[in-house]
Each structure stands twice: as C-alpha cells, then as structure tokens.
C-alpha cells in the first residue's frame, strides 16, 4: 500500500521546555532518561524519582499520555517508547525528541509503529553524525516524512500491528519462563558442589579479554555482513540478535581481538546490563564491542556450568560486588579472572548439559515462532508503512 508522505513536524504539537526547579511544587518528580527505555521491548522499563532541587540540566521536557519518545542518540538502537497514562506529567531528557500527535491528523499508536519501522530507523541511522557517539537532532526527526493515510486507516493498521507485537512479547515471556526453570534447577544443585575442588575462572580459561569498538572515522554499520554484538544483545542465558548490527569484512579483520567463537562465554562489563552473561553458539563469524568480555575455556565441558554459575544468585553477588561505581559502573577483567568456582564432577557436568540441551530445544521452538512472527510483522509494516 502506498500513500502520501507528510513531514512529521506538520502533524505534531509543539512541546515546550521547562525547568523542574521552578515548575514543580513537590520535592520530587518522575524523570525519564535514555536508560529508562528498553530497546528490545520499546517501552519505559524504569523511571527515576529525582529531587526537584537536584534536577539534571537535561530534564526539561514535560510529557503527556500518548506522546512518543524517540532517542536522538545512537538512532540505530531505536530507543523509542509511547507514553501511557502512568507516566503522564513526568519529565523527559532532552536526549529524546518528543512527538505529540495532533489528534485530528495523527494516531499516536500509528506514529509509534512508524518510528519502530525499518524505514524510519534506516533513515535516522543514515542521517546520524558522529563516529563514536552518532546522533540526530530533533529537527532531523521532525523533518522526516511519515506515510499518512486517513485517521481511521491509521487506527486499523495500528490495531493489527499491536496484535503482532503482543504475540512477539508472549513468546519472549515463554523464553524467560524456560530460562527461569533451568536456573532454578541449577540453584538447587549448586549447594552440592560446595565441597568440590575449587578453581578460579582464569584456571579453566585459555584467555579472558574484551571486545573492541569500531569507532573509527567514517565507520557505519551495514545492512548485512558480519554480525556485531553489543551489550544490548547479551541477555542472561541467551543471545538476543533479533535486531542485529553488521560490519563489513574489512572492519571484521581489523577487530581481531573481538572475534568470538562457538562456546565462548560473554559477560557484560558496563552499564545497566552489567553482569549479564550467555554462551555464544554457532559457527558464523561475529565480533563484540568493548563493553563485553570474552571467556574462552580450555575445555568446553565447563561452558554450561560456568555460565550458569555467573547467572546464579551467588555468581551475580560476586560480579556485582566487584563493580566499580562512577559515571558508568563497570567490572574489570581482573575481577572475572579471580572469581573462584567449585568444579563439578563429570557426572554432574553431564547432568547440567543434558538439562541445558532440553531447555535449548524448547527455546529453539520459541525462537522459531518469534522469527516467523517477526517476519510477518516486518511484512505487515512494509506493506502498511510505505
């Protein structure tokens, strides 16, 4: 379906800036910054309560229900969210472009689906400037064009795409339940390992290092090529590359330290996802960025155990207990190398591996459903949002 395209600025209201210190009578206000948004779920996952007299300089935008937030920083990551009544009256960072639809011209849900679409993300990514910290301006977002069918048609399209999104979310929730069941099994077993021989992570590893950033002048992610994994992709127990980034083969060769192999354990070192870990599975070439550590083991028989340990209550306590607070909390490679773990017997390792394979089989079914659902979602968007 093809329809007329209109510049977004022509179908949205103006959003005024304000200073919370003079606007609010209360001692605290709700603040939404770039870290508040889940890039995978496209929603506000957490919100901060900030003292009014300590308002950050970027806390300047009063948001309302049905506003759509678009992160102007790293637009390729597509940090977007639609505001519900729960967050009406909160303050958003100026790192967002706030889009407030004119209700007689533009449906809020339809606008949300548009800013999630491949066409919009690609457009913003191509227009971003800055090698290490690519960003777009509010003007670039508002000057971009949106297909604008009649309002009733917008609502019909949004309703269909909402249903597809719910199905994708239900599948992801099933994945989470499967992982939780396996981890519960592991937690019940780990106490029996306490009397076993103990070794450090370094003792059972060939090496422990971290990835590299391809932040050279002129660098841009590709539409296809070598998969480039960031901390956003590393989830506890699995790798989420439903929205992958790609680099060209030349950059892949230059980033020799960040190449990963089947069986490598990946651990997030910084930011909100600090301490998350998973095992990389597959024979395709891939690289990781500097926010992720690589643990390459001497013997692959330990991979399921070690990753499960790092994800356990005890492992999390050790990882997060060693983090250095600052502008961005981080874990050092030295801290990972020094983690001491009880080494299970071969029969205990085999039992864990058997349980993990059964879990992976269930996860594969969920993943296949997600892939099919996502392909349908993309197909619908490519037909409706063009």
Image (spheres, grey):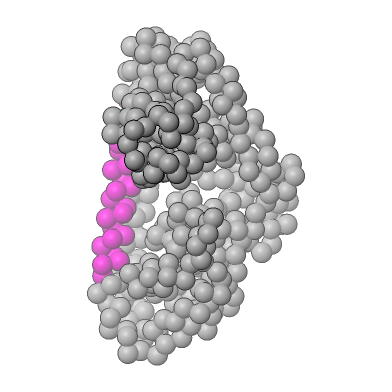
Left of 101 or right of it: where is 133?
A: right
Which residue does the image show at 40% across and 84% down from the upper left?
343
**In the image, residue 317 above or below residue 116:** below
Along the line of sight, the residue nearer the viewer: 323 or 220: 323
In the rendered image, is residue 225 in sight? no
- Residue 101 locus on image (x, y percent): 41, 18
In the rendered image, is residue 272 in sight? yes
Q: Quadrant of residue 128?
A: top right
Q: Main secondary structure of the magenta part?
A: helix
Which residue does the image show at 40% across and 29% down from the upper left?
23
Left of 132 or right of it: where is 168?
A: left
Q: Quadrant of residue 50?
A: top left
Q: Quadrant of residue 353?
A: bottom left
**In the image, residue 224 above or below residue 295:** above
Q: Magenta region: which residues? A: 160-185
Along the line of sight, the residue nearer the viewer: 368 or 152: 152
- Residue 268 locus on image (x, y percent): 49, 61
Which residue does the image show at 51% across and 29% down from the upper left?
97
């Amino acid at each position: 379906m093809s329809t007329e395209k209109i510049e977004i600025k022509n179908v949205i209201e103006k959003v005024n800036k304000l200073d919370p210190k003079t606007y609010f009578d209360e001692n605290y206000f709700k603040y939404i910054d770039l870290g508040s948004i889940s890039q995978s779920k496209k929603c506000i996952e957490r919100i901060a309560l900030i003292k009014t007299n300590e308002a950050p300089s970027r806390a300047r935008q009063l948001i309302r229900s049905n506003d759509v937030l678009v992160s102007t920083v790293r637009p390729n990551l597509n940090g977007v969210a639609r505001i519900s009544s729960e967050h009406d009256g909160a303050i958003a960072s100026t790192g967002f472009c706030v889009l407030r639809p004119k209700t007689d011209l533009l449906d809020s849900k339809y606008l949300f689906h548009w800013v999630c679409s491949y066409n919009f993300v690609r457009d913003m990514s191509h227009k971003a400037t800055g090698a290490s910290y690519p960003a777009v301006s509010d003007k670039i977002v508002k000057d971009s064009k949106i297909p604008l069918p009649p309002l009733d048609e917008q609502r019909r399209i949004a309703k269909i795409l909402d249903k597809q999104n719910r199905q994708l979310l239900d599948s992801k929730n099933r994945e989470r339940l499967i992982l939780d069941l396996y981890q519960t099994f592991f937690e019940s077993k780990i106490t029996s390992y306490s009397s076993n021989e103990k070794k450090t992570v370094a003792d059972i590893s060939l090496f422990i290092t971290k990835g590299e950033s391809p932040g050279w002048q002129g660098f841009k992610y590709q539409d296809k090529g070598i998969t480039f994994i960031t901390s956003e992709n590393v989830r506890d127990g699995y790798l989420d590359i439903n929205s992958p980034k790609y680099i060209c083969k030349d950059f892949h060769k230059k980033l020799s330290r960040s190449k990963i192999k089947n069986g490598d354990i990946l651990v997030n070192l910084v930011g909100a996802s600090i301490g998350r870990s998973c095992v990389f599975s597959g024979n395709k070439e891939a690289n990781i960025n500097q926010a992720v550590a690589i643990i390459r083991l001497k013997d692959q028989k330990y991979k399921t155990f070690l990753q499960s340990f790092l994800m356990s209550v005890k492992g999390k306590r050790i990882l997060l207990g060693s983090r250095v607070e600052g502008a961005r909390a981080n874990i050092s490679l030295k801290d990972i190398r020094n983690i001491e773990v009880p080494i299970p017997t071969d029969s205990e390792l085999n039992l864990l591996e058997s349980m993990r394979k059964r879990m992976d089989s269930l996860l594969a079914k969920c993943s296949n459903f997600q892939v099919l659902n996502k392909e349908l979602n993309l197909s619908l968007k490519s037909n409706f949002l063009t």
